Amino acid sequence: MSLLVVAALLYLGLALGFILVVDNLVGLVFRDPRAPVQPPFFNIGRAFAASQKLNRKQAARHP
Protein backbone atom coordinates (compact mmCIF):
# COMPACT_ATOMS: atom_id res chain seq x y z
CA MET A 1 0.00 0.00 0.00
CA SER A 2 2.79 2.43 0.90
CA LEU A 3 4.49 1.72 -2.43
CA LEU A 4 1.32 2.80 -4.19
CA VAL A 5 1.23 6.07 -2.21
CA VAL A 6 4.88 6.78 -2.99
CA ALA A 7 4.32 6.06 -6.68
CA ALA A 8 1.26 8.33 -6.75
CA LEU A 9 3.16 11.18 -5.05
CA LEU A 10 6.08 10.80 -7.44
CA TYR A 11 3.70 10.83 -10.38
CA LEU A 12 2.00 14.00 -9.13
CA GLY A 13 5.37 15.66 -8.52
CA LEU A 14 6.61 14.82 -11.99
CA ALA A 15 3.34 15.98 -13.57
CA LEU A 16 3.47 19.31 -11.74
CA GLY A 17 7.12 19.75 -12.66
CA PHE A 18 6.33 19.05 -16.31
CA ILE A 19 3.49 21.58 -16.23
CA LEU A 20 5.78 24.24 -14.74
CA VAL A 21 8.48 23.61 -17.36
CA VAL A 22 6.01 23.80 -20.24
CA ASP A 23 4.40 26.93 -18.76
CA ASN A 24 7.77 28.67 -18.49
CA LEU A 25 8.71 27.70 -22.04
CA VAL A 26 5.41 29.02 -23.39
CA GLY A 27 5.96 32.21 -21.38
CA LEU A 28 9.35 32.66 -23.05
CA VAL A 29 7.93 32.29 -26.54
CA PHE A 30 4.69 34.25 -26.11
CA ARG A 31 5.55 37.30 -24.04
CA ASP A 32 2.87 39.82 -23.09
CA PRO A 33 3.94 43.11 -24.71
CA ARG A 34 1.97 45.10 -22.10
CA ALA A 35 3.75 43.48 -19.16
CA PRO A 36 6.55 45.46 -17.50
CA VAL A 37 10.07 44.19 -18.06
CA GLN A 38 10.88 44.23 -14.36
CA PRO A 39 8.47 44.23 -11.45
CA PRO A 40 8.28 47.55 -9.61
CA PHE A 41 10.92 47.86 -6.91
CA PHE A 42 9.42 47.82 -3.42
CA ASN A 43 11.39 49.99 -1.02
CA ILE A 44 10.98 48.46 2.43
CA GLY A 45 12.61 51.48 4.09
CA ARG A 46 10.03 53.91 2.73
CA ALA A 47 7.19 51.58 3.66
CA PHE A 48 8.53 51.27 7.22
CA ALA A 49 8.91 55.06 7.54
CA ALA A 50 5.35 55.61 6.32
CA SER A 51 4.08 53.01 8.77
CA GLN A 52 5.87 54.71 11.66
CA LYS A 53 4.48 58.08 10.63
CA LEU A 54 0.95 56.66 10.54
CA ASN A 55 1.42 55.06 13.95
CA ARG A 56 2.58 58.39 15.41
CA LYS A 57 -0.47 60.18 13.95
CA GLN A 58 -2.84 57.60 15.40
CA ALA A 59 -1.11 57.71 18.79
CA ALA A 60 -1.41 61.52 18.86
CA ARG A 61 -5.14 61.32 18.17
CA HIS A 62 -5.83 58.67 20.84
CA PRO A 63 -3.69 59.40 23.92
Image: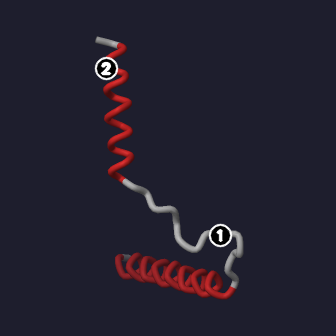
Residue in the foreground of this view, choosing between 27 and 7: 27
Q: Residue 44 location, x and y as percent?
A: 35, 52
Amino acid of disc 1: Ala
Q: Which residue is mark 1?
A: 35
Left or right position of 58 against 8: left
Q: How many marks?
A: 2
Q: Residue 57 location, x and y as percent?
A: 36, 23
SS under mark 2: helix
Left or right position of 23 against 46: right
**Do residues under tags 1 and 2 come within 8 Å of each other at their CB atoms?**
no
Up-down relation of residue 41 to residue 11 (above or below): above
Q: Residue 12 location, x and y as percent?
A: 49, 78
SS under mark 1: loop
Amino acid of disc 2: Ala
The quadrant where residue 54 appears: top left
Left or right position of 31 against 55: right
Quarter the C terminus occupies? top left
The quadrant where residue 55 appears: top left
Q: Residue at x 37, y 82 (%)?
A: 3
- Label 2: how many Cα within 10 Å (few below 14, some 14–19, many 20+): few
Q: Which residue is mark 2?
A: 59
Q: Residue 13 location, x and y as percent?
A: 46, 79
